[in-house]
Amino acid sequence: MATPQGDYEHLLAKCSDYRGALALLKQHRPYLEMLPSMRRPQESIVTIPLPNISIRRAIDGHLGPVSTRRDVVSLPCDSVMLMCDPEWKIKTGVDVVLFIHRPDEDFSELLSRWRHTQILLSENYEWLMPMQHEHLLNEGSERPYPLFITFPQTPERIIRGLNGAGLPVIVYKPTLWSDPEERADLVDPPQFESEELTDDGDAALREWGIDMDMEGGE
């Protein structure tokens, strides 16, 4: 059975919020351990849904490169998580690239999106950052970290193929998300004044399936 378009859109929207991104990372421990601060996740993750990059390319003349130009390109991934140091307000160089299984997408199409992304990110590029994070250094990292997200309806051959290619894959669990009407607080996310999350913040994260008392915290 094909993945419903609504499920894909719902998950993409949730990944746009740092709490949704953190809930996904919790399902893949190696990437979660790269998070600079478990106590300050809001300042440690920058999410960019349907990201664009600016690629610097040389313009060749008869005697070699004479100048450069910038080309803005849309990546074929669904979202990216850029990890940042909450103290220094800089990127750490860990860029997690998300690929959500799209409706009616088969294994070769999903894998091709990652292969195309690898080619684009092998060039000299910069991320086009969200307005509120434009002050951050936006240079791309040397190595992107892919993460594939599937649904219960995803054909077994896709998961088997991703595992065979040595790519990390997790299954989207609906219990991680609440009904949209119950998430009205996302319109105005809570701001935490201290280094540690407030009790209310801890409770909010636990509603998203994130246990702040888990091992491996900051």
Image (cartoon, grey):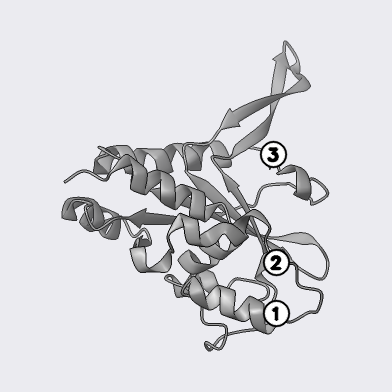
Which of label 2 and label 1 is nearer to you? 2
Residue at figure coordinates x 58%, y 40% from the top left: 51
Where is residue 131 shown, x and y percent of the image?
76, 42
Which of label 2 and label 3 is nearer to you? 2
Which quarter of the figure has residue 60? top right
Q: Is residue 180 left or right of residue 150?
A: right
Q: Amino acid at mark 3?
A: Leu
Where is residue 50 shown, x and y percent of the image?
54, 40
Find the distance from the CA under tag 2 to the CA under tag 3. 25 Å
Which of label 1 and label 3 is nearer to you? 1
Q: Amino acid at mark 1?
A: Leu
Q: Residues within 10 Å of mark 3 (few under 14, many from 20)?
A: some
Residue at figure coordinates x 47%, y 44% from the top left: 78
Q: Nearer the viewer, residue 177 or 168?
A: 177
Cβ atoms under marks 1 and 3 closer than 8 Å = no
**Visible residue check, residue 189:** yes
Q: Amino acid at mark 2?
A: Pro
Task: Find residue 197 and name its label.
Answer: 1
Find disc 3 in the rendering and name its residue: 128
- Label 3: element kind: loop
Residue at figure coordinates x 49%, y 68% from the top left: 23
Where is residue 94 shown, x and y percent of the image?
62, 60
Mark 3 or mark 1, which is nearer the start of the sequence? Answer: 3
Find disc 2 in the rendering and name its residue: 190
Can you say whether 139 is above or below 17 in the image?
Answer: above
Count numbered badges in the picture: 3
